[in-house]
Image (cartoon, rainbow, N blue to C red):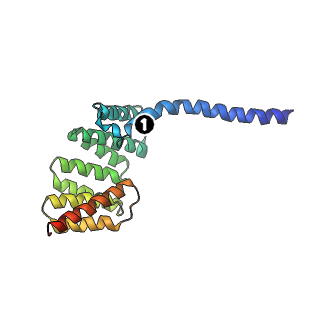
Amino acid sequence: MKKIVRILIVPFAVAAFFIVAAAPAVAQSTDERNCFSTNSENYRLEDFYAKGLAACNREIKSGKHKGKNLAFFLRAQGYWLRVMKRFDEALPVYNRAIELDPQHVEGYDYRAVVWQLKGNNDRAIADWGLAIRVDPTYAAAYYRRGYLYQSMGQTARAKEDYNSSLALPSKNRIGEWAHGEARARLSELAKDGK
């Protein structure tokens, strides 16, 4: 009889654990999902950016994220600030993310984009150099730096970075995007005879 009771209790206990454990995760997942919904088609909605930023702010202020995990949320927060053209607010957020996780390539990459948008090309190039030092296989840093070189009229450097990007394996959608953009820019330069 005890064996039968144990056999019946264990599945109920496991099921109860998952039901109880899942409840808080549902509440958290809404803010987490909104914080990281940067590639959603909802970007056309008027308040989409504000909702994403607010979700990140709540997650960060919750105090439940530390170290590298907090850096992950900070990078997303910086993204929302950047797309809202709040560059001076985005920079210290990226600085903090890099401080918490100096080996994460996207912190340098995203901060470089902000520097470029602010017109500080030297700082942008330096940050893409840091991104490449952290992860030499991060194709987006080569492409973005190449695009900046091209906009500065430094065609040889641009081509070198575009080709470096294409020589790397495409590990994810960012790599695929970088490859597509690098191919398009090289084709554009070839048509222009450069």
Residue under the image location 34 percent in, 45 percent down:
97
In the figure, 142 relative to 45: above or below? below
Label 1: which residue?
Answer: 32
Residue under the image location 15 percent in, 58 percent down:
151
Asked if residue 129 can be seen in this view, the reply is no
Picture quadrant of residue 62: top left
Label 1: element kind? helix
Q: Nearer the viewer, residue 5 or 182?
A: 182
**Where residue 55 sits: x, y (%)?**
37, 33
Q: Is residue 154 left or right of residue 131?
A: left
Instruction: Check the image and name the residue furthest to the left.
Output: 153
Residue type highlighted by circle 1? Glu
In the figure, 82 relative to 136: above or below? above
Picture quadrant of residue 125: bottom left
The image quadrant where one finds the N terminus is: top right
The image quadrant where one finds the C terminus is: bottom left
Q: Nearer the viewer, residue 180 or 137?
A: 180
Instruction: Check the image and name the residue furthest to the right.
Output: 1
Asked if residue 34 can be seen in this view, the reply is yes
**Where residue 64 sits: x, y (%)?**
45, 35
In the figure, 191 relative to 174: above or below? below
**Where residue 146 sits: x, y (%)?**
22, 61
Residue under the image location 32 percent in, 39 percent down:
77
